[in-house]
């Protein structure tokens, strides 16, 4: 039997009460080296950046972090292992891209180990060196720095 596809109504802005669940989900994947972990403090500081998939608790999370006038980043995309493959990640990213468009942000990038997933959503490769230096401040805190093998991809609102 095929799993049921995600219902967008289950996606909503993150709330204060979600922070510990978001932290736990991100910590799980950070422990596997699949994404950069976030501290509880940073989650509270940047809570407005996050959307969650809520199905009797936070089962998925994604963040749209504004970097500059016309540039944002998709960060902290994670979906609980037992909820993967049913479109939750795709729906979370699409909500973030819609928010970027609503805000007038035409370029959204991501640094990822899951490049094929993002290519399906209209992202394409860019050279990390083309990203503003401001972005590298997060990289300095990553255990993979300076030998990061994540791929840089960008989505352009004009090329949907």
Image (cartoon, rainbow, N blue to C red):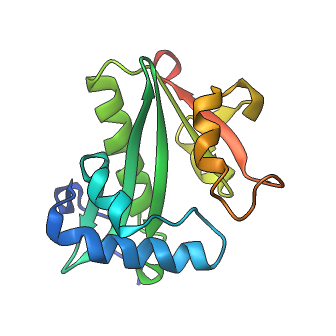
Residue drawn at point x = 43 percent, y = 53 percent: 90
The location of residue 23, given as percent across then percent down, is 37, 73
Please indicate whether residue 3 sits to the left or right of residue 152 in the image.
left
Residue 106 in sight here: yes
Q: Give the quadrant of the N terminus.
A: bottom left
Q: Nearer the viewer, residue 157 or 29?
A: 29
Task: From the top left corner, tell me how far across and down residue 38 is, in percent.
Answer: 46, 64
Q: Nearer the viewer, residue 69 or 141?
A: 141
Q: Position of residue 16 (x, y in %)?
A: 16, 64
Q: Quadrant of residue 109?
A: top right
**How many numbered marks appear?**
0
Task: Give coordinates of residue 157: x percent, y percent.
Answer: 45, 21
Q: Would residue 127 be seen by someone viewing this image from the given angle?
A: no
Name the residue rendered at 41%, 40% in the picture: 65
Q: In the figure, is residue 106 to the left or right of 123?
A: left
The front one of 125 and 49 is 49
Looking at the image, residue 17 sits to the left or right of residue 141; the answer is left
Please name the residue shown 66% across and 71% down the image. 33
Residue 22's place in the image compared with 115, above or below, is below
Q: Is residue 110 above or below residue 30?
A: above
Is 35 above or below relative to 155?
A: below
Residue at 65% x, 57% y is 114
20 and 13: which is toward the camera: 20
């Amino acid at each position: 039997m095929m799993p049921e596809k995600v219902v967008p109504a289950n996606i909503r802005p993150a709330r204060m009460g979600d922070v510990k669940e978001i932290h736990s989900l991100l910590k799980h994947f950070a422990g596997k080296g699949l994404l950069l972990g976030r501290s509880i403090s940073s989650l509270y500081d940047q809570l407005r950046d996050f959307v969650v998939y809520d199905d009797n608790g936070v089962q998925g999370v994604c963040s749209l972090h504004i970097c500059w006038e016309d540039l944002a980043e998709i960060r902290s995309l994670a979906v609980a292992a037992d909820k993967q493959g049913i479109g939750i990640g795709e729906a979370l990213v699409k909500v973030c891209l819609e928010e970027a468009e609503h805000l007038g942000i035409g370029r959204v990038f991501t640094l990822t180990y899951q490049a094929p997933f993002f290519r399906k959503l209209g992202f394409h490769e860019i050279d990390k060196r083309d990203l503003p230096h401001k972005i590298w401040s997060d990289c300095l805190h990553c255990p993979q720095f300076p030998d990061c093998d994540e791929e840089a991809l960008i989505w352009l609102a004009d090329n949907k």
